[in-house]
Image: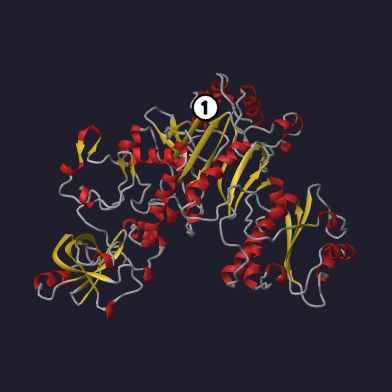
Amino acid sequence: MNKFTTNLRYFIFSRFYILDKHVLRGFNVNQSFSHCYSTRKNVSAMDKVGSIKRINNVNLYTKRSHTCGELRRENVGQKVTLCGWLKYQRMNKFILLRDSYGEIQLLFPVKDIGGQQILDQMPFESIIEVEGTVVLRPECMINKNQQTGDIEIEVEHFKMLNEARDNLPFNIREFQKAKEMLRMQYRYLDMRFPEMQKNLRMRSKLLMRMREFLIHNHFIDVETPTLFKATPGGAQEFIVPTRFPGKFYSLVQSPQQFKQMLMAGALDRYFQIARCYRDEGARSDRQPEFTQLDIELSFTDVECILTLIENLLSYTLSDDYATIPTHFPRMSYEDALENYGSDKPDISFDLKLQNCTDILKKSQHIGPIPDDFGAYLLVVDQKQHQAKATLSKSIKDAHLQISKQYQSAKFIQFKVLPNEGLSKLEKVFGTREINDLRKRFPVEEDSVLFLAYGEKHEARQLMGKIRLEYVNYLENKLGLSGIRRKGLYFLWVIDFPLFELNFEDGSLQSAHHPFTSPNLEDLPLLDSDPLKVRALAYDLVLNGNEVGGGSIRVHDPHLQEKILDLLGIDKGTLQHIIDMLGSGCPPHGGIALGLDRLLAILLNAESIREVMAFPKTFEGRDPVSQAPSEVSEETLNLYHIKVVNKDL
């Protein structure tokens, strides 16, 4: 056993496992839990490190002896105590008992008339406790589709712990799941489905693995405040009223400022599993409150942080995903847009954009050519991409709806017919240009062709959306396989611009946030051409989804002031940060991983709501409690609030 493994095991055991015979402070396990299945004779397999033993028994500290999913043939003859939910019963004799770990069949004795009468009246989902003996099922009754299908429990004692009410909102049946809105409203019922159990338990496991890795590597877990001051230049924040008239807190959209202050405070390796809040529009991969793994460290650079995250994810996922690479590919922001039309490209399939700007910009048929003109081609060839090239009316209409979002780019789509080729494009661009196009991009018959041209940024983004939409159509609607490769395809996107243009007023705004450091090679451009300044920023992409992002931070107070001036942000609102940087703040950087989105991808969930215990709806409402809700006039007066336009 190497030093890393030894130290890590010691850390785990010292935090989460008890000592043999006695716990710290003289607490005696055997004496205090004699009525529970926690005594030494009932503790299953243990791993010993010195005097510390690992306890693997999931029944420890409970009144049950086993779960409903763990008994097998080798347990035949044992006396057991089980607790769980009544899933199903038939003939007032056979019960299917379910808990968080599986299900098992119970057999009631024919002579127990009283028990059978109670069972006949008992609603499904009632909580029961049984004692009995494990027996083999008759050969003809073995259920090979059930983990416990070889055995059943002959019930000797039976107790109803809590009777469920009749007519619950929905049954816990995989084949008749309720609609998501109803499931979210009664989340405590929905959690009983095996899929939700798997998701939430995997979430716990992955977070624990992340903690293990970081703690072993000398990071410290620091909790930072939720109530803070509104941050300029970021996402819309939730505002919290106070008893001070006209004064408000803001719920933090991330611990960004706090973790930088920790670096100035010499806590040089920080992490936190942090709750964050953003008052943004609802999307399938967004929630108003979410969880991220927040990391910051001093005296580092881009390469160090990228390596840290690669090692962290390799360690975290190694037990469940055997194909995690130890080094993720890197791609510049410009290359991502140029080849994939997105700053979070899905590299699990190879279809790339083809730049034909230099050919089509010579056309005399398309009117005035803007300075930032761009033209991009996407060809889906049946032989090359192993996809049946087709273009139905439904997918054409879907593409046209997408194209309407990009007013500065024009869009063309068609199937290349025999003896026709690209001739359809000659009326749009001219014969000479299309001949040049044919020479550079030979297009096979029966291929599908997409073309966008106009303002470069919009043309690329439009083609990036079409690229994804069409592949989704081929896979989900036509059922074609083999287009996307299976597995986890991580990618680092680097060299982002420091600034981007606000198209509404022409001002500069941060591409990430105002604390991101510029690439030191580009510092002279801050005054002459700020839009060409690269940031020391990086995003982590997984299968076309952004799952993390971070940067090296500004640690020079004068540079920070200059960036705030360029952004038009009042320095007074961030004076505490400028003062902190001027106190002797080390160079530092960090990253945040979006845990909800990461888990949704790993578990192949349809949305991040499927990996959260109590998610909000699309409108940001809590379906369980129906929050947000009204408060009393007395409370409104306490916080100096007056409601206007209440009926909106």
- Identify residue for label 1: 263
Residue 534 in the image, given as x and y percentages of width and height: 70, 37
- Tell which residue pokes out farthest to the right in this image: 432
Q: Is residue 54 left or right of residue 453?
A: left
Q: How many marks?
A: 1
Report whether 563 appears left or right of 107.
Answer: right
The kind of secondary structure element at disc 1 is helix
Image vertical order of residue 363 relative to residue 240, above or below: below
Residue 264 visible? The answer is yes
Q: Is residue 116 left or right of residue 462?
A: left
| Front residue of this view, candidates 426 and 339 | 339
Identified by mark 1, the residue type is: Met
Q: Residue at x 65, y 73 (%)?
A: 392
Q: Position of residue 558 (x, y in %)?
A: 64, 22
| Quarter occupied by the N terminus | top left
When the figure is inspected, residue 77 is found, relative to residue 584, above or below; the finding is: below
Q: Residue at x 30, y 62 (%)?
A: 69
Task: Classify mark 1: residues with Cα within 10 Å, few (<14), some (14-19) or many (20+).
Answer: many
Asked whether 557 or 619 is in front, the reply is 557
Instruction: Give the x, y percent position of residue 405.
Output: 65, 56
Which residue in the rendered view is the most extreme toward the top? 583
Q: Residue at x 65, y 29 (%)?
A: 563
Structure colour scheme: secondary structure
x then y, percent, for residue 139 = 27, 79
Q: Residue at x 54, y 32 (%)?
A: 297
Residue 38, can we see it? no
In which quadrant of the rendered view does residue 623 lie?
bottom left
